[in-house]
Amino acid sequence: MKIIHIILVSLLLGMAFNSTSHAQLKVETTTQDLAAIAKAIGGKHIDVNSLTPGTRDPHFAVAKPSMIRRVNRADLLLVIGAELEAGWLPSLLQSARNSKIQAGQSGFLDLSQTIDLLGKHNVPVSRAMGDVHASGNPHYWLDPRNGIKIATAISQRLAQLDPANINDYQSNLKTFKAGLEKKYQQWLSELSYLKNQPVIAYHTSFIYLAHAFGFKIVDEVEPKPGISPSASSLGKLIRNIKQKKIILLIMEPYYEQRSVKYLKDKTGIRIAVLPQSVGAKEHIKYYFDLFDAIVKELNNKDSQ
């Protein structure tokens, strides 16, 4: 009986160890873009969820009870950083009471620290300047080359937290990088007509997209970031569009369109409403899908 008892205990301990060793890491992200990249790298070894949907502006979110519960149970929290989530993430972290995913811990990864951010301000920032980010523009995922930097940092952190599966994380990163580099060359070719061309943007979100594909954002519909356009500012834009012969205006789908339709009526400028994140449209499920959709819309001469 003692021998049987010892065998049963050993089997139970082995089963418990086996279950623990193969448990998925629980990963929470602040955007669907980070979730998509994390899933590509982590594969079957992680359970990943985004705290915000790709259909909404990630600057704004509310710490719902369901979000608090998920963050409380997370092993790793991936954030865009550069103050993008400053309005809601601190309170969420405080409410979640998870010491593993606080800033400075191995379960917290600020991906902005891996990027050479554009749009940095070397002077003191005030609300009079509009919705600006002193540390730099946070929309860096809109340059696919930065997607590789994001994926590399995620791979390294997953390997740190789960060294048993380091080979899978490195292999997935290699596949992701090779695929994205190949697609980037394809996207560059498809958008070659935009190289060095002047473009109007609604908000300051697309400077990384412009940097990646070689066009120039020469003005914004918002007179200052986050400030609604006025009749006076729209009048200045109309003169600028006509003077510089600007043929394209790009914007996110969640901004008002009355102002841009007015600009189109007065100048004939083409309006391209671009998905800004994975999940912005139902068919955009992966990071590669995002740029396929952006390129398709930029090449759609029948857009608004």
Image: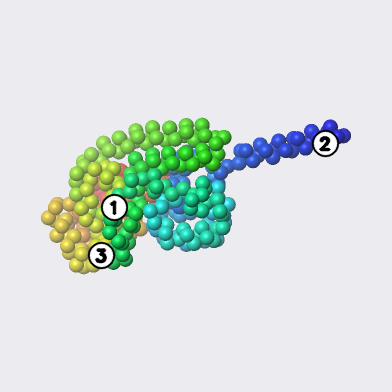
The residue singled out by tag 2 in the image is 5
Count of numbered labels shown in the rendering: 3
Task: Decide which of 263, 158 is in the foreground and name it.
Answer: 158
Q: Residues within 10 Å of mark 3 (few under 14, many from 20)?
A: some
User: Who comes first in sequence, dot 2 or dot 1?
Assistant: 2
In the rendered view, would you say 248 is above or below 192? below
- Kindly identify the residue that appears in the image at 46 percent across and 42 percent down: 154
Amino acid carrying mark 2 in the image: His
Q: Amino acid at mark 3?
A: Pro
The amino acid type of the residue labelled 1 equals Gly
* Of callouts 3 and 1, the N-terminal one: 1
Q: Earlier in the sequence, mark 3 or mark 2?
A: 2
Q: Does residue 99 appear anywhere in the picture? A: yes
At horizontal 42% and vertical 35% (from top left) the residue drawn is 176
Q: Residue beneath label 1, please? A: 119
The quarter of the image holding the N terminus is top right
Residue 180 position by quadrant: top left
3D distance between C-alphas at marks 3 and 2: 77 Å
Residue reaching furthest to the left: 243
CA distance separating discs 2 and 1 = 67 Å
Considering the numbered disc 2 on the image, is that residue within a helix, a strand or a loop?
A: helix
In the picture of the structure, the residue carrying the numbered disc 3 is: 229
Given contact means CB atoms under 8 Å apart, are the residues at marks 3 and 2 in contact? no
**Dot 1, crowdedness within 10 Å: few (<14), some or many (≥20)?**
some
Would residue 269 appear left or right of 182 to someone viewing this image? Answer: left
Q: How far apart are the alpha carbons under marks 3 and 1?
A: 21 Å
Using a 10 Å C-alpha cutoff, classify the residue at mark 2 as few (fewer than 14 neighbours), some (14 to 19) or many (20 or more).
few
